[in-house]
Image: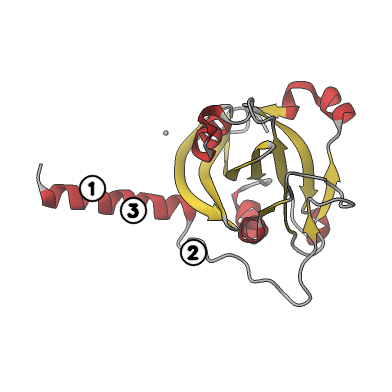
Amino acid sequence: MRHGRQLVTGAVGAMALMGALTGCLFGADGDGGAKAKAPAPPKLGGKRTACELPVRFSLEKSWKAEAVDAAVQDQIGPLAKQGPVTLVCEIDAKPAGHIGFLRVYTGTKGAAAPGGEPRALMRAFVAAENFESKVGFRQTKAGDLPATEASYSVTDPSAGETRRQRALAVMTKSGGVVIHLGGLDTDEHKAMLPAFRLAKKSLETTG
């Protein structure tokens, strides 16, 4: 949430540098997501699941999902919104031994689709962070859906701590969806990345 971018040989060199920087931001593993285990991991997002969403995706074992309804949104006020989207689901990693959350944000088709593209939505989401830095964006796929992924840092000025963040944006018939992974610190964030990658790999629309 809020806490708060000549010559042919020269062009080739610049492209290689950009690729190296992107690799540093997103990690060397690229899109090699977590492999599904047998039996298949549970899906979140459909009817009769903890959070009914415009998308569904697989959860890592023991992660616990809870819907963020209108009453909770009112209670937490501005913290319920980030850019054009609103927090609707929190997936707690504590039962799996980590400190952090996967959070799902959604918005109406008009409000959450600036430009009508995942990249525009992702940029608006990250721009709404406080104290963000080292931001990288890349076009990717989430399941079969066109998506934009962001990797960035957020610094807490009072504590002087910097934490890595990862987020993914897709568009659906109902509007935009952002899945965000934070963490207590950078080590916890890295330990929870397999859950983010599993959600990304298994993502599909529910409509």
- The quadrant of the rendering that contains the N terminus is top right
Other-residue count near label 3 (Cα within 10 Å), few / some / many at <14 / 14–19 / ≥20: few
Residue at image position (69%, 29%) is 108
Q: Secondary structure at mark 2?
A: loop
39 is higher (above) or lower (below) than 10: below
Q: Could you say whether the residue bearing mark 3 is in a helix, strand or loop?
A: helix
Please, is residue 116 above or below residue 10 in the view?
above
Q: Quadrant of residue 39?
A: bottom right
Ranked by sequence position, the earlier of labels 3 and 2 is 3
- Could you classify mark 2 by the number of other residues whose Cα lies within 10 Å: few (under 14), some (14-19), or many (20 or more)? few
Q: Which residue is mark 2?
A: 29
Q: Amino acid at mark 1?
A: Ala
Q: Position of residue 113 (x, y in %)?
A: 58, 31
Marks 3/2: CA distance?
Answer: 14 Å
Mark seen at residue 19: 3
Q: Nearer the viewer, residue 41 or 130?
A: 41
Among the 4 quarters of the image, the one containing residue 155: top right
The amino acid at mark 3 is Gly
Residue 100 horizontal/vertical position (percent)? 72, 48
Who's the residue at 45% across and 43% down the image? 136
Residue type, label 2: Asp
Where's residue 116, x and y in %?
54, 33
